[in-house]
Image (cartoon, grey):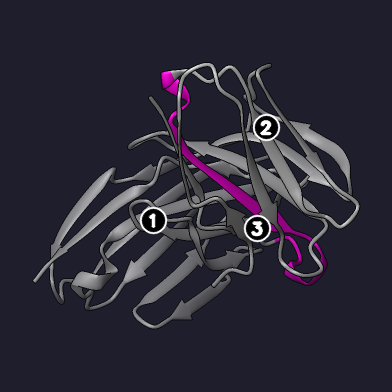
Amino acid sequence: EDQVTQSPEALRLQEGESSSLNCSYTVSGLRGLFWYRQDPGKGPEFLFTLYSAGEEKEKERLKATLTKKESFLHITAPKPEDSATYLCAVQDMDSNYQLIWGAGTKLIIKP
Amino acid sequence: DSGVTQTPKHLITATGQRVTLRCSPRSGDLSVYWYQQSLDQGLQFLIQYYNGEERAKGNILERFSAQQFPDLHSELNLSSLELGDSALYFCASTGGTSGNTIYFGEGSWLTVV
């Protein structure tokens, strides 16, 4: 059964303190792994799609990496405006383009 | 701006009533998804349409229904509303130029009183 687990559930960092969020997944065949950012009361905002192990993508202070079993979202020198819930989701090759979602990591960056 | 447009943004209605939420997908996207998110909860997949046809069904109640029209916009109909139906309802779209990336609208806040 397809499964996505995100850790930690919540993470509090000081401004400038770099860290990583984890997304572990189990699928029969990975079509893609997606990272989204969600602010309270807003729709998830697309960040990255990763397709194969070894792939990396960067956007400002965020960098996403992918292995055969997990993905990391690295946050370098975060700012308070990076505070949000970060969601990970996977598409299985056989899933009809459905997304299997993790529960998210709530990130709080203190000034 | 994701390019997915949802209306209305906010809606307050009474128990037992019926409402319709509307979604316009990104230009060129053929597939539309509907999700429900209750307060501090995760995204719950409701239903997916592809080019007018139902493609997948998730945890959608029998009181809820949806359709996708020839111009590819979609509507989610919620009837016999209960207090527990209060939530954010998101529409998302993919396909076309989006590839397999799913883009979300800003949601429709539904409050049932």
Q: Mark 3 or 1, which is nearer the eye?
A: 3
**What element does badge 2 sit on?**
strand
Please state which of residues B93 and A4 is positioned toward the viewer in this rendering. B93
Give the residue type at disc 3.
Answer: Ile
The quadrant holding residue A37 is: bottom left
Percent coordinates x, y for residue A74 in the rendering: 35, 68
Q: Mark 2 or 3, which is nearer the eye?
A: 2
Q: Is residue A87 above or below residue B67?
A: below
- Numbered circle sitting on residue B102: 3
**What element does badge 1 sit on?**
strand
Percent coordinates x, y for residue B76 in the rendering: 68, 37
Give the residue type at disc 1.
Answer: Tyr
In this picture, residue A55 sits left or right of residue A62: right
In this picture, residue B53 sits left or right of residue A20: right
Please state which of residues A87 and A55 is positioned toward the viewer in this rendering. A87
- The residue singled out by tag 2 in the image is B77
